[in-house]
């Protein structure tokens, strides 16, 4: 079974986030942890599909050159993610509020960072240039 790039990144992101613990949601094996913004409980299954409304957050936004490096990725509620995009990511990079948001999230992500648990079977980590639809 082939996972999409987004699924693999979400899975890796949860695997390296210390708030995400192996668990079960409605009988489905899952990783359950916390939104990087609001701390609300989020779950993804072991194929990297969100069970709740988890989404991939780019701490340094892509429109400002943020990459898919794991240190730049976090898991957030779709609504938190959208709010950051709407309120902050569209600002200039020099914007003080955007800078503060990025710094806070980077520090939070660094604190949560861990090696993936050995019990998890992770797919290979997509490389930076790989695209789902690339031919
Ligand atoms: Zn949230």
Image (cartoon, rainbow, N blue to C red):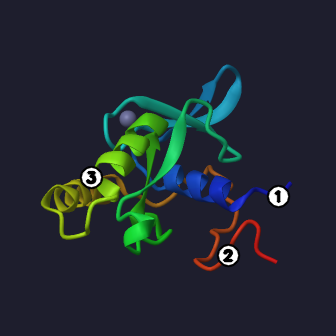
Residues at circles 1 and 2 in contact by the CB criterion of under 8 Å? no
Is residue 74 placed above or below 81 in the rendered structure?
below
- Please report whichever mark, 3 or 2, sits nearer to the chain's N-terminal start: 3
Picture coordinates of residue 94 (x, y %)?
18, 70
Vertical side of 112 occupied by 37: above or below: above
Local crowd size for mark 2, using a 10 Å CA cut-off: few (<14), some (14–19), many (≥20): few
Mark 3: which secondary structure?
A: helix
Q: Is residue 61 above or below residue 104?
A: below
* Residue 94 appears anywhere in the view: yes
Distance of label 1 from label 2 (alpha carbons): 14 Å
Quadrant assignment for ligand 1: top left
Label at residue 108? 3
Q: Are marks 3 and 1 in contact (CB under 8 Å)?
A: no
Q: Quadrant of the N terminus?
A: bottom right
Q: Quadrant of residue 40?
A: top left
Within 10 Å of the Cα at label 3, are there few (<14), some (14-19), or many (20+) other Cα atoms?
Answer: some
Tell me where residue 35 sits by quadrant: top left
Residue occupying the far right of the picture: 1
Q: Spatial distance from mark 3 to mark 2, Cα to Cα? A: 27 Å
- The residue where tag 1 is placed is 2
Relative to 5, 111 lies left or right = left
Residue furthest to the left in view is 96
Of badges 3 and 2, nearer the viewer stands 2
Q: Earlier in the sequence, mark 3 or mark 1?
A: 1
Left or right position of 16 against 48? left
**Image spot of residue 78 (x, y percent):** 48, 38
Q: Residue at x 44, y 67 (%)?
A: 62
Position in image of residue 120 (x %, y %): 63, 51
Task: Say what secondary structure mark 1 lies in.
Answer: loop
The residue located at (43%, 35%) in the rendering is 79
Residue 53 as seen in the image, left or right of residue 102 = right
Q: Which residue is mark 2?
A: 130
């Amino acid at each position: 079974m082939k996972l999409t790039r987004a699924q693999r990144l979400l899975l890796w992101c949860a695997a390296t986030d210390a708030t995400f613990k192996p668990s079960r949601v409605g009988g489905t094996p899952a990783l359950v942890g916390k939104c990087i913004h609001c701390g609300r409980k989020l779950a993804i299954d072991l194929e990297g599909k969100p069970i709740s409304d988890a989404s991939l957050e780019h701490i340094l936004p892509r429109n400002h050159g943020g990459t898919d490096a794991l240190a730049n990725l976090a898991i957030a509620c779709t609504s938190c993610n959208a709010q950051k995009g709407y309120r902050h990511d569209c600002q200039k990079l020099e914007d003080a509020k955007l800078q503060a948001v990025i710094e806070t999230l980077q520090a939070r992500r660094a604190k949560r960072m861990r090696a993936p648990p050995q019990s998890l079977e992770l797919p290979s980590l997509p490389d930076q240039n790989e695209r789902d639809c690339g031919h």
